[in-house]
Amino acid sequence: MLYILLAEGNGLILLVTGIICLAVGVTVAWVFQNTLKKTKNQAAELQAKTLIRDAESKAEHIIKTAEVDSKAKAITVREETEKEFDGIRNELRNTEHELSKSEGSLERQIESNSDRKKNLDSRENKLKQKDEELNIKETQLSKTLSEQRSLLLKISNLSEDDAKKMVLERLEEDVTHEASALIEKTINKAKEEAEKTSRQIIINAIQRYAAAQTCEMTVSTVDIPNDDMKGRVIGREGRNIRAFEQATGVDVIIDDTPGVVVISAFDPVRREVARLSLSKLIQDGRIHPTHIEEVVTETAQEVEEKVTEIGKKVILETNLSGVSSKLLPYLGKLSYRTSYGQNVLRHSVEVAYLCQTMAEELGLDGQLARRCGLLHDIGKAADHEEEGGHPAIGHDLAKRSGERAEAVLNAIAGHHGDIAATTPYTALVAAADAMSASRPGARRETMERYIKRLEALEEIATSFEGTKRAYAIQAGREIRVIVDPERIDDANAWKIARDIAQKVQDELTYPGEVKVTLLREVRCIEYAR
């Protein structure tokens, strides 16, 4: 039992000891834990203080940096603001200056308007006064006119209607005179403009058409190989040359010039037939009257065919249609006709193209103008066979051959002014004809002979009493005479023109016709000052 008690006492001791050990351990653990906690707290507190100090240091640095940045930005903003304020101040100053100017201008305008208003008021008052004065004067004038009208009617024994008629007649005379002066001024201005325009059109036509120089000769010659052949041409007692002249209608001139026989004939076609026939006879060697007639007949037929062929070629060259076949031989004959060395056919072609150019410049029918120009000298192909001037002969020939265009017929008959022009194409043909004939190189005539012929024309015209001046124009084909209107009346003017034409016909030698135009002009000139 004791053992049990001892055993139970040891156990209790062990239990107490354990409890005490446990208590001590707990206490130690608690102390250690508290100590460790205090240590941790102290370390954490120290770390916290360190962190706080670092944070405070960083915060102070950030605050200082922020303060510096904010001060810099504030300075920048202040500077920009000050600049904006300076700009606004300048604008305000300028606006204020402009406003002050505008205010001054407005004040001046107001003052000016007030002055104008005063002037207007003053003028209005004056106008009212003048209006009143005019009304008074008008009343007085009406009264005076009535009195004078009554007095004039009493003095002249005229009724009021007669007096009105007289005044109207005088007014009509004055108006007619002024209208005549205005019409004359308008016509002169139109003439100046027309002359300027026509000169430009002619210049353009001349520049656009370039023709060749004259190179044709008017004398036909045939080469003779030797004197023996010349004798055979003459024949026994001249029978061969007489037969040749009779068959061809030409004059054969055989002189001492070696190797040449000259053929002279007024008709160029007959001269060409004679030249070709004589050339054939010389080449053949058989020269006797019978063979001469055969060769001449054959050659004449060849020439007729040739001239017709030339006429066809010219129609093709000028691109004309509807030309009568009867006119083709006459066009071909113009190729053998010359005027002062200028071939008439080439002259006609040249006139045709010049007419076309000028017509197209004026808005007219260029085809019709070219037709008028080509046929204008067709009468020269038959003027050896019929009497009269080539314009009238050409007109009749074209009409007989079937030409129906009135413009063409009038251009043929009137291009030298023999009849009045009824269409503008006649004037174009006349201008182109003069241009073609007078251009440099177109015609062959010595300057001395040409000047002498013109001087002779002018001397004959001025030799008559009453003539003042005379001008030879159109290469000597027209003479214009100006007479003194106070010494020569209309009846004597016609007589002087006929006398001049007769004297020119009797004393001068000239080709074609010479037109005498006598001018008797009265000019009435007044000046308004």
Image (cartoon, grey):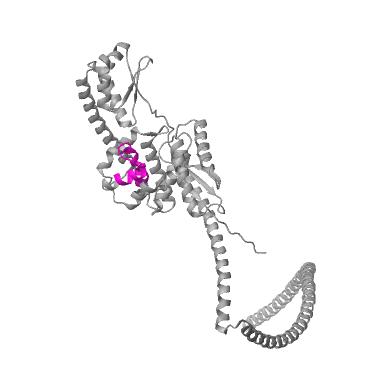
Viewer-proximal residue among 293 and 161: 161
Image location of residue 177, percent across then percent down: 57, 66
Q: Magenta part of the protein: which range? A: 370-397
Q: Quadrant of the N terminus?
A: bottom right
Q: Is residue 210 visible?
A: no
Please say whether residue 413 is one of the residues in the magenta stretch. Answer: no
Q: Is residue 253 above or below residue 195?
A: above
Q: Main secondary structure of the magenta part?
A: helix
Q: Residue at x 21, y 20 (%)?
A: 289
Image location of residue 287, percent across then percent down: 23, 17
Please say whether residue 383 is one of the residues in the magenta stretch. Answer: yes
Q: Is residue 491 shown left or right of residue 15?
A: left
| Quarter occupied by residue 129 | bottom right
Q: Is residue 243 above or below residue 170?
A: above
Q: Is residue 385 shown left or right of residue 104?
A: left
Q: Residue at x 33, y 52 (%)?
A: 406
Viewer-proximal residue among 350 and 10: 350
Image location of residue 525, percent across then percent down: 60, 59
Q: Is residue 515 visible?
A: yes
Viewer-proximal residue among 241 and 25: 241
Image location of residue 434, percent across then percent down: 45, 42
Q: Is residue 286 above or below residue 385?
A: above
